[in-house]
Image (cartoon, rainbow, N blue to C red):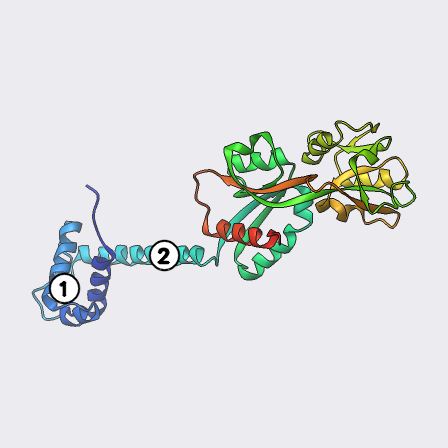
Amino acid sequence: MQPNISTKLLHAFLALDECRHFTRAAERCHLSQSAFSVVIQKLEAVVGAQLVERDTRNVTLTPEGEIFVEVARSLVSDIEAAFADMADYVARRKGRVSIAALPSLAANGLPAVIAQYKKQFPGITVQLYDALSDQCLGLLRLGKADLALTAPGASLMEFESRTLCSDPFYLVCRRDHPLAKKKRIALPDLSGCDLIHLAKSTSVRQKVDQLIRDIAVNNTGFEVEHLATVAGLIEHGLGVSLVPELTLFQFRHLNLTAIALETDDVVRPIYIVKQKDRTLSIAAQGMFDLIVASFKQP
């Protein structure tokens, strides 16, 4: 049978060991002497041994009592340490939160949020994975990430998601390109353009393929993984590209320009995603709330 010992019993016995007097120990525990005696008797019954000699004016521990007092100190110390540790988690003085985010968000937007979070809760470890959309959801599925910031995908339905922001698309081209002087670009304006693509595995490419399905663009043969590569190819006159606004920081070259597409519904929605039916840790919930507030659109 498992022993049923409360911290009240342990604290009473430790008080008796320190005071070596029933009345003073009872006063310390805010109990009457009779109630205190019952507490010690209950503890002895649970332990299965006499712990205190009662036949002298001053209290003396039995040999078993001398052994158990060390056990009691250890138990109380462990319990107090555990609750203090838990209090740190509840107060966000310690903990861990892990985020998986699209590279564009991981590099632009999210770092400011993480810096603000770390300023508020310096004891919490923040882990960041920059990954493509499907990889973000995979990390979430495996429990390696608490939250994912990602674009639409086939696997999104198995998770709980919330729209974080809308990411409009821009044409990026050289400043000497025929379309560079336009203030806004209509999709038909792209007809005949040499288009540089991101890889098919990216959420950007999946959206771009939808946008240009009825437009006669020229296929340059370039399908690359990294935006820096796209920028280099454009800068050397090898084509143009359609990219979302969150990626524009990658194209801050003097010879490049970005022009918004004029159709308002040409956007890539960005979601904040978590596992269904699973409560976030206090640390992760704090990060979730801060991300939502920071990306809130006017």
Residue 8: x and y in percent read: 22, 59
Q: How many marks do you count on the picture? A: 2
Q: Nearer the viewer, residue 236 or 297?
A: 297
Residue 106: x and y in percent read: 66, 46
Q: Is residue 1 left or right of residue 264?
A: left
Residue 115: x and y in percent read: 62, 57
Point 34% across, 58% down: residue: 80
- The residues tagged by marks 1 and 2 sit, at their Cα atoms, a distance apart of 25 Å
Position of 191 relative to 234 (above/below): above
Position of 113 relative to 215 (above/below): below
SS of the residue under disc 1: helix
Position of 100 relative to 154 (above/below): below
Q: Which residue is mark 1?
A: 36
Q: Which residue is mark 2?
A: 83
On residue 241, the disc is: none
Residue at the left extreme, as displayed: 55
Q: Which amino acid does the dot numbered 1 rest on?
A: Phe
Point 30% across, 58% down: residue: 76
Precedes in sequence: disc 1 or disc 2: 1
